[in-house]
Image: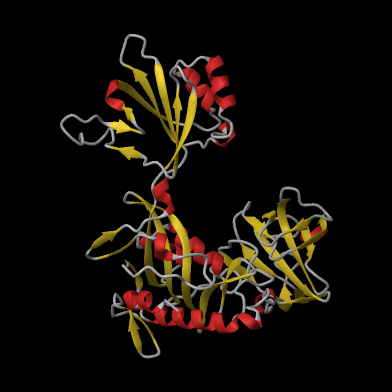
């Protein structure tokens, strides 16, 4: 195992702070703390790949460790907006001497095509057709994004002829169109710097708000939500729930452009501590708890993003419209009309009907034991029809208020062997755990990550 040097480096950065949330006699800081660390490059057995392609930093500065991104062309060399690199140097943008051109900038509008943008700046239609046709393997005009920036470089003569078109598809990818004698399109991939970081947080309102208030990349919240989607209901978080996470963040220059991956995490929720330990099994990386059970379960904790539970499973509830007492064999999730509703697990759609008080409804059979129903929908999801096989997390409909309903909500029902059960009390079976023959290796990895996470303070 070559984990120790990495663990020691991260452990050395941990700090002790004071908090308004107290557990087990320990005082911790409310809010969220983050850091970046410099560590010896090391290989993590059972995890996706080596950390040797990561940029890591500490208070002393930043160290760039060679990565595969070094093979790509640099985005900017002495940018047009900066100062000349030397007395006799030119400002270069993708190797183009930009001082020689008039630069016109713009942003792709909704439903606008690259061809129409080029044409509006004086490029002949014959040239546009040839350019796009001959460079189909490099650039797909159908994937143009509205809101993306572009620049047109015009000659500084009386003709103001367009000679280059630069389209920034996203922070990572830019396309340069040569409109001179030789028509061509070139792709430039930005040099990405990766930083190994850790963050810890104490929930005050929600995971998303906690991260937002502390200027974290929003993708970190999304990554944690996805990892724990089957074990934690993130709309049922409690004040003083808390988490720790070790992850890689990607930067272009000083701008964060995403989370490459989460290495390990720990979440304390409702009195339980749930670790997320990465491990590769059958060539697939998944997260497992400390016993080797997969965090991924057969069913999601909830079928939608909801604001509150307006009515719970009950054997005797007074119906808000009929004014009679009768069983309510479901959970009512209050949410705005149009909120996507997803299948909580893989299965086959058995019916898509409008049934009186239930309104527009979808039924799904997951296996020989479990089935679910989604009531009061405003409409069905794309392609949802009887006999269609759906995957976990696939949109099957949208929140509505059809049937006997006092307002927009989803009435979600869960059945075991044909009998209704409380969805909030169902213990969903996990997918395949770590194989017995791999448990020794997994145990060593888990022990190392748990030790490392314990050094991170709140």
Q: Residue at x 31, y 11 (%)?
A: 157
In the image, taking residue 262 as reference, residue 197 lies left or right, namely left
In the displayed image of the protein, which residue is found farthest to the bottom? 25
Q: Quadrant of residue 131?
A: top right
Is residue 358 in view?
Answer: yes
Task: Decide: is 82 above or below 217.
Answer: above
Task: Tell me where residue 199 appears, x and y as whole percent.
Answer: 38, 69
Whether residue 291 is situated above or below residue 194 in the rendered picture: below
Expressed as whole percent of the image width and height from the top left, the position of residue 390 reads 74, 58
User: Where's residue 153, x and y in %?
Assistant: 37, 23
Question: In this rendering, would 84 be left or right of 134?
Answer: left
Place residue 2 in its image quadrant. Answer: bottom left
Residue 354 is at least partly visible in this image? no
Q: Position of residue 80 (x, y in %)?
A: 28, 32
Name above or below for residue 244 compared with residue 56: below
Residue 451 left/right relative to 86: right
- Given the current orientation, which residue lies at the most extreme top position? 158
User: Where is the C terminus found, in terms of image quarters?
Assistant: bottom left
Quadrant position of the N terminus in the picture: bottom left
In the image, what residue occupies the spot 48% across and 76% down?
267
């Amino acid at each position: 195992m070559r984990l120790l040097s990495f663990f020691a480096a991260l452990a050395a950065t941990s700090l002790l702070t004071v908090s308004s949330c107290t557990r087990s006699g320990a005082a911790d800081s409310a809010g969220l703390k983050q850091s970046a660390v410099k560590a010896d490059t090391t290989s993590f057995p059972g995890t996706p790949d080596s950390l040797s392609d990561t940029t890591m930093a500490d208070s002393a500065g930043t160290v760039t460790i060679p990565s595969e991104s070094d093979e790509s062309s640099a985005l900017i060399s002495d940018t047009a907006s900066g100062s000349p690199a030397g007395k006799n140097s030119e400002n270069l943008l993708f190797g183009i001497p930009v001082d020689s051109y008039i630069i016109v900038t713009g942003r792709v509008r909704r439903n606008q095509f690259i061809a129409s943008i080029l044409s509006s700046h004086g490029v002949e239609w014959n040239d546009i057709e040839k350019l796009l046709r001959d460079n189909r393997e490099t650039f797909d005009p159908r994937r143009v994004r509205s809101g993306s920036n572009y620049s047109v470089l015009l000659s500084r003569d009386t003709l103001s002829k367009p000679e280059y078109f630069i389209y920034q598809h996203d922070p990572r990818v830019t396309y340069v169109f040569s409109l001179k004698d030789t028509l061509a399109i070139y792709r430039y991939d930005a040099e990405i710097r990766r930083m190994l970081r850790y963050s810890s947080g104490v929930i005050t309102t929600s995971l998303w708000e906690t991260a937002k208030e502390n200027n974290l990349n929003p993708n970190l919240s999304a990554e944690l939500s996805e990892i724990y989607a089957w074990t934690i209901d993130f709309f049922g978080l409690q004040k003083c729930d808390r988490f720790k996470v070790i992850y890689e963040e990607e930067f272009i220059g000083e701008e964060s452009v995403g989370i490459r991956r989460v290495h390990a995490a720990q979440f304390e929720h409702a009195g339980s501590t749930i670790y997320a330990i990465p491990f590769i099994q059958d060539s697939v990386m998944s997260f497992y708890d400390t016993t080797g059970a997969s965090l991924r379960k057969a069913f999601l904790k909830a079928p939608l993003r909801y604001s509150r539970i307006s009515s719970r499973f009950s054997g005797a509830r007074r119906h808000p419209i009929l004014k009679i007492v009768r069983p309510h064999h479901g959970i009512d999730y209050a949410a705005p009309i149009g909120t996507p509703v997803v299948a909580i697990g893989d299965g086959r759609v058995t019916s898509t009907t409008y049934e009186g008080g239930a309104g527009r409804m979808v039924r799904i059979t997951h296996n020989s034991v479990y089935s679910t129903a989604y009531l009061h929908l405003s409409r069905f999801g794309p392609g949802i029809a009887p006999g269609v096989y759906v995957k976990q997390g696939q949109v099957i409909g949208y929140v509505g208020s059809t049937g006997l309903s006092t307002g927009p909500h989803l009435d979600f029902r869960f059945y075991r062997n044909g009998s209704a059960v409380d969805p909030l009390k169902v213990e969903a079976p996990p997918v395949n755990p770590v194989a017995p023959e791999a448990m020794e290796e997994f145990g060593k990895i888990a022990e190392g990550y748990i030790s490392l996470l314990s050094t991170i303070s709140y």
